[in-house]
Image: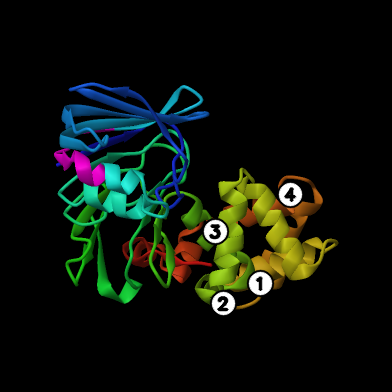
Amino acid sequence: MSSVVISSSFNFLSDQDWDWEVSTATPSNIAIFNGPYLQTFAGSFVYDANGTVFGTTTSSSFYFNNALVYSVSGMSADATQLQIFASTYGDTQQTYAYVLKGNDSIKGSVGNDVLLGYAGDDTVDGGSGIDTAVYRGNLANYTLTKGAGGYTVRDNSVTDGTDTLTNVERLQFANAKLAIDLEGNAGTTAKILAAVFGAPSVANKEYVGIGLNLLDGGMSYENLMQLAINVKLGANATNTEVVNLLYTNLVGTPPGVADLAYFRDMLDQGVFTQASLGVIAAETSLNQGNVDLVGLSLTGIEFI
């Protein structure tokens, strides 16, 4: 079982092909480098006259500009095989899959990470940030189950095993992407879409993707709400139009004369802005029921 701790944002899908040189080769340590890149290995090693290394690697660390990116402990990897991988361009994924083929533990950084557990039953904690767990098969081949502290993802074909996820916001499959942070940006996106465009719009993968991208990038709830209202009604929508839109999407019928006057007056008097009223509408139990937020927390929301 290997344990991976990521210290700064990292993407397992990114290639690490670089022309390395050996800076250290002792019976217990190997270091290879190229410019800002440094990879160290610890274990028990012997070398032949051709420079081939034999033995077992027990840990490894990767640095960029002298800053630790990740460290791996608990390894039991054949040193010769790792040397072959390191010497071959395009073998980055094969290297990770070889090292992480067991029941491993992966701890993400405080940034946005893209994480893979590969084979085995893995424990993945994304840490802070917007983190994505990647699976190599199609969505239909997996079973997603929500638990008290996170989710489990089971590969029904057994290739990727069953992973336990905490602090992971996104899932990426070969043919689909899911947002599972329904108490975070995914939930906010769903509530805005339902309040402004109607509950069926949550099935629009492109709309969901736009909302997630803006919120993940730092846009506030109210600013995204105002943007959605502008897209739906135009940039100069009247307060009457906004009240009619929100009320109809929540209740299913236009507001009566009294309700329309009440909420319009609130906007006219500056008690609420169009965006803040939209947020209030989005947070109502009516809206959350319309979009079935509880159900979405079990399945996630598909996006592109």
Residue 30 location, x and y as percent?
28, 27
31 and 9: which is toward the camera = 31
Label 2: how many Cα within 10 Å (few below 14, some 14–19, many 20+): few
Residue under the image location 73 percent in, 54 percent down: 274
- Callout 3 amino acid: Thr
List x then y, in percent, for residue 68. Answer: 41, 26
Q: Is residue 198 left or right of residue 43?
A: right
Tell which circle, 3 or 2, labels the residue nearer the N-terminal end: 3
Q: Check contact, mark 1 vs mark 3: CB within 8 A.
A: no
Q: Nearer the viewer, residue 28 or 282?
A: 28
| Left or right of 82 in this view: 242 | right
Residue 273 numbered mark, or none: 4
Residue type marked 2: Gly
Q: Which residue is mark 1?
A: 255
- The part of the chain drawn in magenta is 72-82
Q: Residue at x 55, y 67 (%)?
A: 194
In the image, what residue type sits under mark 1? Pro
